[in-house]
Image (cartoon, rainbow, N blue to C red):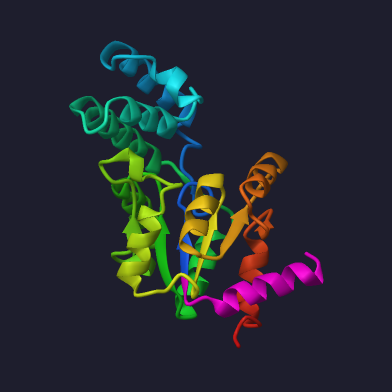
Amino acid sequence: MTESDVTSLVRLFGAAKCVLFDFDGPVCHLFDGHPASGIAAELRNWAAQNVPGDVVAEAGSADDPLELLRAAASMHPHSDLVKEMERQLTSQELRAALTAEPTEDADLLIRRLGAAGFRLAITTNNSERAVRSYLERTGLSDFFGEHVHGRKPDPKLMKPDPDCLRRALDMTGSTAAESLMIGDSPADCLAASQLGVPFLGYARNERKRQCLVDAGASEYVPSLKPLLEVVESGHWVE
């Protein structure tokens, strides 16, 4: 960390009263024990047999189950087929949540932020049920309470649509300016930008970093450790 990096983090946390976490990435590695590629393969096979049209071609990413769901919803909005596909994905995410491993330093960062009085919320494209399952298993539920905002039945409301962020701000009573979004995808960055929520990218490798930069992220870290150090130091307090 350079001095300017520390200064940026102090500024971000000094202005924030509410921290919005994306789930898969910044909080845990949801699909480590139940790979997303395998889930996507099952959804591809199901879609090929049940959904008219080429969902895989429409998705543009055959290995991302969320993109497959988004593509199916675009081709057949509000259909029973999409509802069933979403139910299948939720079931798979619930299985994955049973073995998901915490992102390094995420658990302690959440606990320190909660102890420091920050309002905390999860804003994710994953199933709310899967998030709650993971939080309960790891003892983090009390830090988020009712503020878990996951995928709605309409996949068009997934990020980069800012729907889940808007719900989090409304329920926590927070303004965009006094909030901070921590995410690891371009969709996170774009959703935060639409509402004017300051964004901090979690870029654990060069590919992630470049994707975030291309999406407009100007602040990012390679791990959560620098965030934890700033919060534990108390230097962010104005």
Residue 14 lies left or right of residue 110; in this view the side is: right
Residue range in magenta is 1-18
Residue at 34% across, 50% down:
150
x%, y% of residue 61?
51, 25
The answer to if 9 sits in the magenta stretch is: yes
Along the viewing direction, whichever of 89 and 100 lies nearer the viewer: 89
Residue at 23% across, 25% down:
81
Quadrant into which the N terminus falls = bottom right
Residue at 57% across, 49% down:
184
Along the viewing direction, whichever of 91 and 180 lies nearer the viewer: 180
Whether residue 173 is situated above or below residue 110 in the rendered picture: below
Along the viewing direction, whichever of 226 and 78 lies nearer the viewer: 78
Residue at 74% across, 67% down:
5
Along the viewing direction, whichever of 122 and 15 lies nearer the viewer: 15
Whether residue 106 is situated above or below residue 61 in the rendered picture: below
Q: Main secondary structure of the magenta part?
A: helix
Quadrant into which the C terminus falls = bottom right
The answer to if 213 sits in the magenta stretch is: no
Whether residue 5 is situated above or below residue 67 in the rendered picture: below
Residue 67 lies left or right of residue 80; in this view the side is: right
Q: How many marks?
A: 0
Q: Residue furthest left?
A: 80
x%, y% of residue 234?
62, 82
x%, y% of residue 206?
72, 42
x%, y% of residue 64?
47, 30
Q: Residue furthest bottom?
A: 238
Q: Residue furthest right?
A: 2
Residue 215 lies left or right of residue 79; in this view the side is: right
